[in-house]
Image (tube, rainbow, N blue to C red):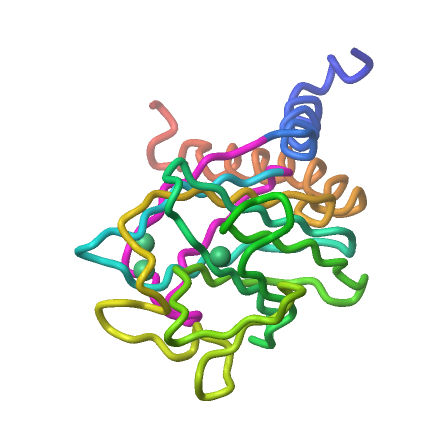
Amino acid sequence: MKHRHWLPAAAGLTLALTCAGASAITISEREPNNTGATAQAVLTNDSTIRINGARTFTDPSDDFFSFDVRQGGLLSIVTSSRDFFADSILGLYSPSGLLLASSDDAPGRGLMSAIQFLVPAGLTGRFTIGFSGYNPARLTCSATVTECYDVSGDFVFDNFVAGGGAGGSTGWDYAIDIGGVSLVPEPGALALWALGVPLLAAVARRRREPHPTHAAA
Ligand SMILES: [Ca+2]
Ligand SMILES: [Ca+2]
Ligand SMILES: [Ca+2]
């Protein structure tokens, strides 16, 4: 490798490229995460994120997760469950909290949800997803599975109901897979990051240098 004579730079670049590659991270859900404001932050440079979560009978609350979108591109969010009776709903919110897309039963996924959203180049930042169970008594969805609204006309996640979240569908585990080019930092940012790692290492080394009063150490 050309940079063998400058190990910190090589190490930083290798780490940065590892982060930018087709790497995946698996995260376990942490309650409470019941509102957009208390969403569980999933912060990573990995290109795909899997969240393993649950809607249990003791805690059937809505589940919110936030993650960083670094550049425009197709953002893919797919949910699944090992339990055949699982019936999810899913919403995607912009960094300013605007509902961008929602899903009840996605084509080919049974009763589980999925969203494909083309993130405009200028709309980067911390996005949030809301996930819950479908309850026909509280929710109506269009036939095209694009939008779900509760009985008050709002999307269901801003109307959390204790003991049921959005729905009566509970008591199942789920997985949410988030992927797309938009999760990975831009090449320019990566280059800066790779340069920054050896710089920080040099600063840290300098700080660790013995103080004059302890020069003998
Ligand atoms: Ca949960
Ligand atoms: Ca929750
Ligand atoms: Ca559904």
Looking at the rendering, the stretch of residues picked out in magenta corresponds to: 24-47
Main secondary structure found in the magenta portion:
loop
Q: Quadrant of the N terminus?
A: top right
User: In the shown orientation, is residue 48 left or right of residue 83?
Assistant: right
Is 52 within the magenta? Answer: no
| Pick the front one: 163 or 178 | 163
Q: Picture coordinates of residue 23 (x, y %)?
A: 61, 29
Name the residue at the bottom extreme.
152
Q: Quadrant of the C terminus?
A: top left
Q: Picture coordinates of residue 67 (x, y %)?
A: 54, 54
**Quadrant of the rendered image containing residue 21:** top right
Which residue is found at the position 72% from the left and 49% from the top? Answer: 182
Q: Within the displayed image, which quadrant is ligand 1 positioned in?
A: bottom left
Which residue is found at the position 27% from the left and 59% from the top? Answer: 60
User: In the shown orientation, is residue 117 left or right of residue 27?
Assistant: right
Q: Picture coordinates of residue 215 (x, y %)?
A: 38, 28
Is 29 within the magenta? Answer: yes
User: In the shown orientation, is residue 211 left or right of residue 5?
Assistant: left
Name the residue at the left extreme.
58
Which residue is found at the position 37% from the left and 39% from the top? Answer: 83
Q: Picture coordinates of residue 163 (x, y %)?
A: 22, 68
Q: How many marks?
A: 0
Which residue is found at the position 67% from the left and 33% from the top? Answer: 16
| Pick the front one: 63 or 60 | 60
